[in-house]
Image: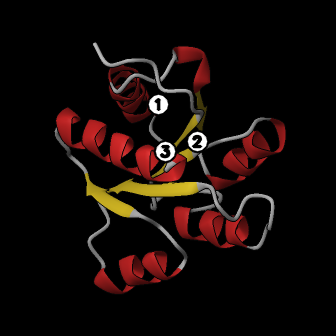
Amino acid sequence: MNPPLQCHVLIVDDSPILRAAIKKVVKLAGVAADHIFEAGHGGEALAVLETVWIDLVLLDLNMPVMDGEQFTRQLRTRPDLNDVAVVIVSTEANRERLERMRALGVQHTLRKPFEPEDLCRLIAEVLGAKSA
């Protein structure tokens, strides 16, 4: 069992089943259940960010209402949220789109389907870099 991570994670995906699977892995990575938040699209995610500090966003790109790229563009215009870490967890394979996301400061991309160990490693790496 990993020691508890003192951080807040936001999972943004339009699939409730995938959010539940990702949440299970985030808990395995050591994040307390009450520090994990969920949103079904970018608009809901921005609303969550208005109410609670988030250290890491695990973001799908392909969602209705507001997709991951639109969300990240809005996130990066906010000085108070500009340093929130973002990791893409998506089926997206479009190289140009992924390059645009990197230009917006996205740290990593994890392709679905993924191995739980890979997501745990990314969470530890990103959150470790933030606390350093």
Give the position of the N terminus as an image quadrant. top left
> From mark 3 to mark 1, how far is it between C-alphas?
7 Å
* Local crowd size for mark 2, using a 10 Å CA cut-off: few (<14), some (14–19), many (≥20): many
Left or right of residue 51, residue 72 in this image:
left
What's the residue at 44%, 76% (across, down)?
A: 102
Task: Indicate the amino acid at tag 2.
Answer: Gly
Left or right of residue 121, residue 64 in this image:
right
Looking at the rendered structure, the secondary structure element under dot 1 is helix
Whether pointer 2 and pointer 3 mark residues with C-beta atoms closer than 8 Å, the reply is yes
* Local crowd size for mark 1, using a 10 Å CA cut-off: few (<14), some (14–19), many (≥20): few
Read off the residue under disc 1.
16
Find the residue positioned furthest to the front.
132
Q: Can residue 63 be seen?
A: no
Sequence-wise, the earlier of marks 2 and 3 is 3
Q: Nearer the viewer, residue 23 or 131?
A: 131
Specify how the rendered protein is coloured: secondary structure
Whether pointer 2 and pointer 1 mark residues with C-beta atoms closer than 8 Å, the reply is yes
Residue 3, position as x, y percentages in the image: 38, 18
> From mark 2 to mark 3, how far is it between C-alphas?
5 Å
Sequence-wise, the earlier of marks 2 and 1 is 1
Looking at the rendered structure, the secondary structure element under dot 3 is loop
Q: Can residue 23 be seen?
A: yes
Task: Indicate the amino acid at tag 3.
Answer: Asp
**Quadrant hosting residue 99:** bottom left
Above or below residue 104? Residue 86 is: above
Read off the residue under disc 2.
40
What's the residue at 32%, 21% (across, down)?
A: 28
Read off the residue under disc 3.
13
* Local crowd size for mark 3, using a 10 Å CA cut-off: few (<14), some (14–19), many (≥20): many
Residue 46, position as x, y percentages in the image: 74, 51
